[in-house]
Amino acid sequence: VKVSGEDDMLVALARCCNPVRGEQIVGYITRGKGVSVHSVHCPNVTQLLFDPGRKIDVEWTPGKDGDSLFDVKLQLEVDDRQGLLAKIVSTIAEEKTNIKNVEAQTFGTSDARVSMTIGVSDRKHMERILSRIRRIKGVRAAVRTLN
């Protein structure tokens, strides 16, 4: 990430929203920790920017695909049926994507929720994975979640 007008500034990706290369981002000058970079859709951004003097323009630096991986949390609302989790995991693996964490929870009915963290190279990679997951029979919803 490049900070507008600054060459050598400490920059950290915010953990609250885990911005992904290709997303619109905004920088917030922190006290003693450099610039915190948030997705413009981060719910914390509106709270942080009460002091407009601490907002700073930031942009993604050019990089090759796969240079960096960004953790993305997904939440899936699915049918509780045998083999569905295996199909989801297989679909993600076909996209050459690492699953860092997965948790599945079933409910009294035929409903289930799958929460997972995956590593993606950029916004397009994430959107491609979500699109493929949504096409799996038994997946009712698949969305990226923020912390």
Image (cartoon, rainbow, N blue to C red):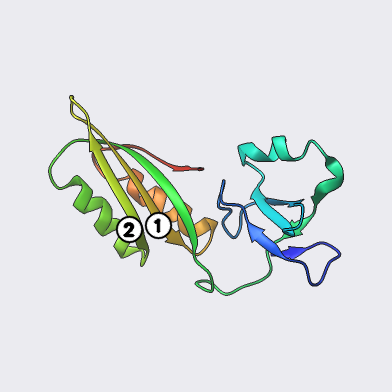
The residue shown at (62%, 41%) is 41
The front one of 57 and 137 is: 57
Distance of label 1 from label 2 (alpha carbons): 9 Å
- The tag on residue 55 is none
Count residues near mark 1 (Cα–Cα under 10 Å), then give few for <14, some for 14-19, many for 20+. some
Q: Is residue 57 above or below residue 147?
A: below
Answer whether labels 1 and 2 touch (C-beta < 8 Å).
yes
Classify residue 126 as left or right of residue 24: left
Q: Please, what secondary structure does the residue beneath circle 1 have?
A: strand
The kind of residue on which mark 2 rests is Ile
Q: Position of residue 102 (x, y in %)?
A: 31, 51
Image quadrant of residue 35?
A: bottom right
Q: How many numbered circles are shown?
A: 2
Type of residue at label 1?
Answer: Ile
Q: Which residue is mark 2?
A: 92
Residue at 64% x, 39% y is: 44
Q: Looking at the picture, how far across and down is residue 29, in whole percent?
A: 77, 52
| Mark closer to the chain start, 1 or 2 | 2
Measured along the vertical axis of the image, is residue 25 above or below residue 134? below
Tell me if 76 is positioned left or right of 30 in this view: left
Residue 116: percent from left, percent from top: 36, 49
Residue 15, percent from left and from top: 56, 51
Residues packed near mark 2 inside 10 Å, few (<14), some (14 to 19) or many (20 plus)? some
Residue 97's place in the image compared with 67, above or below, is: above
Residue depicted at x 74% and y 66%: 2
Q: Residue furthest left?
A: 82
Residue ID for mark 1: 118
Viewer-nearest residue: 41 or 47: 47
